[in-house]
Image (cartoon, helix red, strand yellow):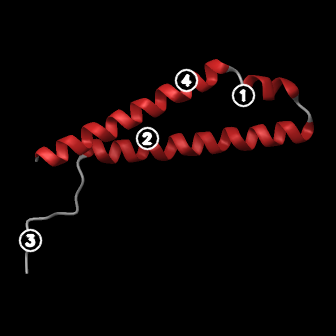
Amino acid sequence: MKTNLTDEHNFLFKWACKGLKFFLLTLLGFAIAYVISKVFGVSTIVQMLLHPSVWEFFFRIAVFIFCLFAIAIIYESAR
């Protein structure tokens, strides 16, 4: 039996998923760098990772990726 439903997602949704994957991998890398820096006592790297401008940058990227997902969901719903 054939249905009209397809399992293909639009390009924007695929792009948002890749962006989310790399964003989470970057956060994991920063977490690993933070832990290793704390263990070896490298305070300059810890201070750099905890600087508010770094977290503001990550917050902006997270909002951008959330907006991409919202646009992709609205586009898929309208289609």
**Going by the picture, which residue comes out furthest to the right?**
41
Three-letter code for the amino acid on which mark 3 is drawn: Thr
Return the mark for residue 36.
none
Three-letter code for the amino acid on which mark 2 is drawn: Gly
N-terminal label among 3 and 1: 3
In this rendering, which labeled residue sits more in front, label 3 or label 2?
Answer: 3
> Which secondary structure, mark 2?
helix
Three-letter code for the amino acid on which mark 4 is drawn: Phe
Three-letter code for the amino acid on which mark 1 is drawn: Leu
Residue 3, picture quadrant: bottom left
Q: Is residue 23 left or right of residue 36?
A: left
The residues tagged by marks 4 and 2 sit, at their Cα atoms, a distance apart of 15 Å
Return the mark for residue 49.
1
Percent across and percent down for residue 42 are 88, 30
User: Which residue bears the numbered disc 3?
Assistant: 3
* Front residue of 10 and 54: 54
The residues tagged by marks 3 and 2 sit, at their Cα atoms, a distance apart of 31 Å
Q: Which quadrant of the figure contains the N terminus? A: bottom left
Percent across and percent down for residue 68 are 33, 36
> Which secondary structure, mark 1?
helix
